[in-house]
């Protein structure tokens, strides 16, 4: 999804998680020319829905980790908008990186995967969001 992908991942104290990931899109002027608001929304949806991934389910943390002692985080995809992922377990190396107090969770594969003939190591850095201290909903 590129280095500028956007998303959110949440973990609950009772052992469940939810993730949503999408590439970062910019609206192109040409996509809105001579189209109604509904046409633009439909076009944007059709162009982007195939790139959007969402899944939720239980998660498991193996702190002992692999043979190198790297902790392993597993997400069981109980529900997903990508049908072939349902029931799959995503196994990721994980580490916390507190660089500049940013609070990153870094998830990555053990080895590179091949995409379009190129080997790539997938790594996703999730930054901790500040607490939502809103006493009421935004106006």
Image: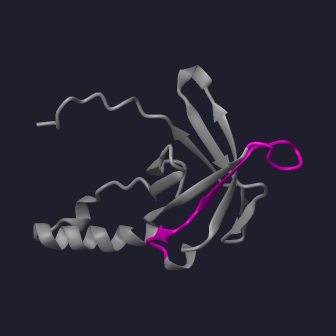
Regarding residue 83, the answer to whether it shows in the image is yes
131, above or below 27, in the image: above
Report the side of 70 relative to 38 (left or right).
right
Residue drawn at 12 percent across, 66 percent down: 37
Residue projecting furthest to the right: 67
| Residue in the image at 35% along x and 71% along y | 47
137 relative to 66 in the view: left or right: left
Q: Which residues are magenta?
A: 63-82
Is residue 80 rendered magenta in the image? Answer: yes
Q: Is residue 53 magenta?
A: no
| In the image, farthest residue toward the bottom | 84
Percent x, y for residue 139? 11, 37
Asked if one can make out residue 34 in the rendered structure from this viewpoint, the answer is no
Residue placed at 55% from the left, 58% from the top? 58
Q: Is residue 62 left or right of residue 11?
A: right
Q: Is residue 82 left or right of residue 26?
A: right
Front residue of 27/124: it is 124
The relative height of residue 97 versus residue 51 in the rendered view (above or below) is above
Quarter of the rendering containing residue 42: bottom left
């Amino acid at each position: 999804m590129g280095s500028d992908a956007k998303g959110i991942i949440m973990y609950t104290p009772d052992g469940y998680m939810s993730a949503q990931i999408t590439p970062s899109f910019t609206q192109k002027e040409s996509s809105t020319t001579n189209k109604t608001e509904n046409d633009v929304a439909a076009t944007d949806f059709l162009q982007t829905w195939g790139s959007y991934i969402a899944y939720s389910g239980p998660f498991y943390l193996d702190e002992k980790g692999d043979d190198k002692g790297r902790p392993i985080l597993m997400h069981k995809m109980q529900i997903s908008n990508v049908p072939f992922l349902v029931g799959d377990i995503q196994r990721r190396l994980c580490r916390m990186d507190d660089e500049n107090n940013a609070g990153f969770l870094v998830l990555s594969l053990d080895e590179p995967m091949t995409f379009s003939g190129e080997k790539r190591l997938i790594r996703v850095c999730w930054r901790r969001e500040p607490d939502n201290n809103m006493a009421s909903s935004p106006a």
